[in-house]
Image (spheres, rainbow, N blue to C red):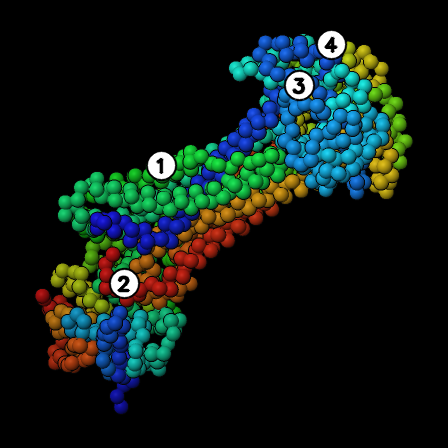
Amino acid sequence: MTPLNRKLYRDLWRLRGQVLAIALVIASGIAVLAMSLTSMEALTDTALAYYERYRFADVFARVERAPGYMADRIRALPGVQSVDTRVVKSAILDMPGFDEPVIGQLVSVPERATPPLNQLALRSGRLPRVGHPDEAILSEPFAEAHGLGPGGRFGAVINGNRRTLTVVGIALSPEFVYTIGPGALMPDDHRFGIVWLGEEALQAAFDLKGAFNQVSLSLLRGTDPELVIRRLDQMLARYGGVGAYARADQMSNWFLMNEIRQLESLAAILPTVFLAVAAFLTNMVLARLIAMERSEIGLLKAFGYTNATIAWHYVKFVIGVAVVGILIGWAAGYWFGLLNTRLYADFYRFPFLLFDPSPRAFVIAALVSVAAALAGTLGAVRAGVRIPPAEAMRPPSPPMFQRTRLGRSRLFAALDQPTRILLRQIGRYPVRSTLTSLGTGMAVAVLVSSLQWLDSINHLVDVYFQQAQAQDVTVGFATTKSSEVERDLGRLPGVVTTESMRAVAAKLRFGPREERQALQGVPAHQELSRVYDASGHALEMPPDGLVISTMLAEMLDVGIGDRITVEVLEGRRPVFEVPVAATFETYIGSPAYLDIRALNRLMHERPSVNSVHLRLDRNEMQDFYRELKAVPQVAWLSLKEAAVATFHDTLAKTLLIFIGFFVVFACTLAFGVTYNAARIALSERGRELATLRVLGFTRAEISYILLGEIGFLTLVALPLGCVLGYALGALILRAFKTELYRIPMAIQLETLGLAVLIILSATVFSAFLVRRRLDHLDLIAVLKTRE
Amino acid sequence: MAPTPALRTRDLTKVYRSGEVEVHALRGVSLDLYPADLIVLLGPSGSGKSTLLNILGGLDTASGGEAWFGDLQLTGLDDRGLTRYRRAHVGFVFQFYNLIPSLTALENVALVTEIAERPMSPEEALRIVGLGERLHHFPAQLSGGEQQRVAIARAIAKRPGILLCDEPTGALDSRTGILVLEAIERIHAELGTTTVLITHNAVIADMTDRVLVMGDGRILEERHNTRRRRAAELSW
């Protein structure tokens, strides 16, 4: 080993505290990057393999009832590879040991053959047999939630007939990787599940013999789904088609792909913060190392070492620090990635999980961090090796200080000398001081931007569920009902108030833009489910005219007064124009409302409803649920309290783990910045501090000078970090914004306080480590040596 | 009756252990320093003079023997006690000045007067060393001799019981060195501070009444100058 390399190893070892502190910051960046990239890769690989192996369809369409022979016609469309027709219906289920009614989505599965598309991944048991109409397969998460396995039994009201079904198998399906019930915001495996029944049995139960109400298509490679969808819509319109949609818009797949996109944003935003701070820290440490080794550099040059050799020596130091960080980051990233992917597997249910990260993610992470560290330090290296040898061997002249206007001010005159020392030190190195504050500020920001999720989501839940909705239960029907159904439901035990609603599937058009969006008819003045603006007020429905969400207004590029063309996709399929009367801000979906009377009029129908909101007397809930289980044609149910509870449970499971990661990362960041800043201050001013000790200053007093500077910079960093955190949070939330939901920024003061407190603790801890070194200052050496 | 010594040591020993080797830096030093004494500790490097100065100044602890500052027994004080002692009673002047670069001349002196019990004003201290005009200069704006005189002003501003100067002219040329010695001389004359000057420059010994020559951890010889020469008369 060359002497220079030996020096390199010893330098790295001597500065191990600082090297490790920086390496941990680099490792955090790499861990986030590798975690995001590996989870992305695992989710993508798993999803694609799953979709391919179990033949997930490319296009889906629902109709009211289409004759079986239509399948052949659809198959004949250009670009179509295979076609599968099914019956898909809903039923209220009566699960053993569970009082509340449960909604089951009934999906037909052929008894005699394997379906060409959307095949089941049978986890246990078998398929239903011909002639056994009560044999059912349950989706695995649903079966788990209710503790059912093959042989288990449960009740179901299927098309008005009460039946007892027997579980014969447990399965997963590529169609239901993410199982979310109608009207729900999060999966609730207790209250919504998929039930596969034999095709013949289901056709018989719903009077659909030789017919279907759902069709799935797979396309030939390179076929544009939009072309097929257009032809399909034309073909199915007269069978009550409500518009076909591509895989990209299929609910389960949409959520999964959205998750992957969010990981992508995460991979881009947060590692940047960590690596930038790491670059600054490496620069700070290296600049100090080079300053201390001035005379050695001069000596090496005097011996004839070239600038390039010396520069390479210090570059290797930087690479060395980065490599330590990379190794830790790789290990942590792999582990976090695995953990994260497993966590995802709780929500996105796959029959298998492909976690086999390619080296790509790790190589990218490593290259990015080495590049960042080098970019940050090249300036210091260049400045260091450029000094002529003779000058390098002389001690550096004492740092120049100047009296500024502030220094002459009366305020400054009132300060004691130790305070002046620390303030002048900050002023003497403005860039370094600013970057130190910025570094700690970034730690606060990372923390604020992760902790804000809890506040923001709580705010969303509060506005969406608590402020806007006064109902306890919403009952949805499979078909449009006469408005009398509201009265019928009102007679159920415990019902205090009712409010009906009608939604129709429609295409909304304005100019060249078109969106598929249910049009929701609601009472002019809503008592229960209110059309509610996020700023905190409900909107009355104008007699005619749409009240649309700002999201939809944005999607259609419309403003108040513009007339939207509505093409209804059900009933008599009327097409009409309505003006936009008002817009409102909402966090969920992109809804469009109008007065229910106006909607019924435009549909040319007598008063009709398809869902009813109910407010209940809590004392009679059990009776209400019992009777509700017998109400025919209930297609979906939304229990507000359960929805809120699910929301919070899910968040507790996922978000807290995620936030836990980031608390650790942010503390690492704060620790790395403070520890290095304090160590460098100590290295630069050890002699000064020792002198003060000799002059009779106590340890506490000199600690004040050393740590006061860090303390001051931290105090500046805290409010700065809160502001940065707000910006970072907004950036992340914007990256997470979708047409389905927008999470509003709503950071609570307590959260800022918590973030500040956590970072302050990390800072104090690192300051404490450096403070201990003050006890070992060599007072005697100070008298004898010149720096 | 003989006056009470300001500083007194009895059989002071100091042993450093460096690896396997024991270094006997002091091998039993007994010494009395009286108020208003100006003495020079002379000796080659390794003779133990710095070790003695460090123990007298409360920077180091002895391995054996006793050291007293008036009624205060220095041997036996803990770190806190030694800090208090240095703060209240000791003025230090170092070879390399050890000024705080971020403080002006005035502020460097104020650094000490702020924590002293009955200090003189920083301006007064700087006037005594002849720097009344350069109060607001930073160390980097002062010459070596000026820096050392600021350091002396800093050492005496608290009106210390004892002034310890470790090679105060070691880093200076002879002309500047003499200016510094003149400052020390004037302070001794004006304030009567007990002053110990360490040097290996034998010429400086001529400006004091008492010269202690050290070697091998012991006081080898004590000389009394019959005639003190003024600092201005010295040359080397």
* Of B194 and A618, the residue lying toward us: A618
Question: Mark 1 near mark 3, Cβ–Cβ under 8 Å?
Answer: no
> As drawn, is A596 to the left or to the right of B133?
right
Spatial CA span between label 2 and label 3: 87 Å
Tell which circle, 4 or 1, labels the residue nearer the N-terminal end: 4
**Mark 3 — residue?**
A84
Spatial CA span between label 4 and label 1: 61 Å
Can residue A458 be seen from the camera position used here? yes
Question: Mark 2 near mark 1, Cβ–Cβ under 8 Å?
Answer: no
Q: Which label is found at residue A782?
A: 2
Residue B168 x/y as whole percent: 20, 65
Residue A233 x/y as whole percent: 67, 12
Are marks 4 and 2 in one subunit? Answer: yes
**Mark 4 — residue?**
A238
Can residue A540 be seen from the camera position used here? no
Spatial CA span between label 4 and label 2: 96 Å
